[in-house]
Image (cartoon, rainbow, N blue to C red):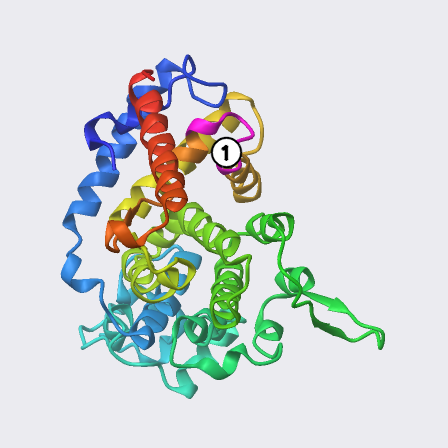
Amino acid sequence: MPHKSRIVTLIKSQRSPYMIDFKELKYLDEEFADFRRKLNLLSSDAIDIPIKTLSIRYWYESLRAGASLTIPSQLQEKFEPDAISRTEKGTIEFTKNKWSGYGRGDHRPQKALLAKVELVAPGSTRALDHPLWLALDITKTQILKGDEFLRRLTPEIQCLVLQPNDQLIASANFSPFSKRRLDQILRKPNLDALACLTWLLRKAHANQDNNIELIFTALHNALIMLAMDLQSLNIALPLIRKFIDNILPLGLPPYLKQLMTPEDYLILSFILNATAHHKLARLKRPTSWKSRSSFMLDLLNGKYGFDMKFAMMVNLELVQNINSIPQEVKDEFQQRDTNRMRAWRRLLYGAS
């Protein structure tokens, strides 16, 4: 990764058509400084957590964010008001709040509580049992058989991976996924898209499919696009750690190793999201998530120049004995690494 103090300078309108104006740099610098401060407060020791804990935290944070609340007692008052004790003056009495445990992911909420929450936030229980948690568990190999897993995804993702057969019943299209089809999934970036790409990568690894590199790149790009939003739910670092440790290596040949950390993904996500947001605002175009994600994908695909595309590529290294790797592979890797480093130099310094 480039030096952090110069990251915001990559967004300059003079360097390429998608950069923002100089007048916006102070605002972006303040944004990035605040982002770095918050990132530095996070403990790297706390990001290796069980999938179950992650799912509970995601459920809690989704409720918190969706209701615009900040502390556990507020969530309890909204979703479980009958558990609140009040004084004669009507103020809430202090009691040990089990919702704090949900925020930490300590224990899964009971069915009775989930039923109460569903009355206020219909569909919220799905966060606990989201297909992504199953896809992340590499011991669950049975999910790769058939298309039952894909049918758990939202309809907008299902329609991209399932297609009608002769009996007019949707069935999985297991033909190799083209970049176009993968981009269609990336244009709907959410947890279901992430679950779908995770499943596709595991499936491609199990079958040794030729398109595994395309799926790996799509999943890497999805993580960059989504990392900032996941961070707003306080789950980005532990979730991305799961991908780095268990999922992304499945898409790499044995002679390559990924060097990126969860923090690296967050920094790239900040750059990509901020670039898209400020450019769209300058063009007086909608800055909604749909517009922003579409623009981010265009940046990653090189539609506005190859510097951003190359800079956002995953950072890799050759790990096997240099003599055991074919020369053409070494040459291809060297060219790829050169393109990535040159792209960062041009974005940060305007130099070749």
Amino acid type for the residue under numbered disc 1: Leu
Looking at the image, can residue 67 be seen? no
Q: Quadrant of the N terminus?
A: top left
Q: Which residue is mark 1?
A: 299
Q: What percent of the width, then of the height, locates residue 224?
A: 40, 46
Closest to the observer: 246 or 232?
246
Identify the residue at image location x=42%, y=37%: 273
Q: Quadrant of residue 311?
A: top left
Q: Residues within 10 Å of mark 1 (few under 14, many from 20)?
A: many
Quarter of image, res 129: bottom left
What residue sits 66% from the left and 59% below the top?
Answer: 160
**Residue 180 vertical position relative to residue 242 in the rendered view, above or below:** above
Q: Position of residue 260 (x, y in %)?
A: 28, 49
Mark 1 residue element: helix
Judge whether residue 240 is colored magenta. Answer: no
Q: What residue is drawn where x is 31% and y is 30%? A: 341
Residue 303 shown in magenta: yes
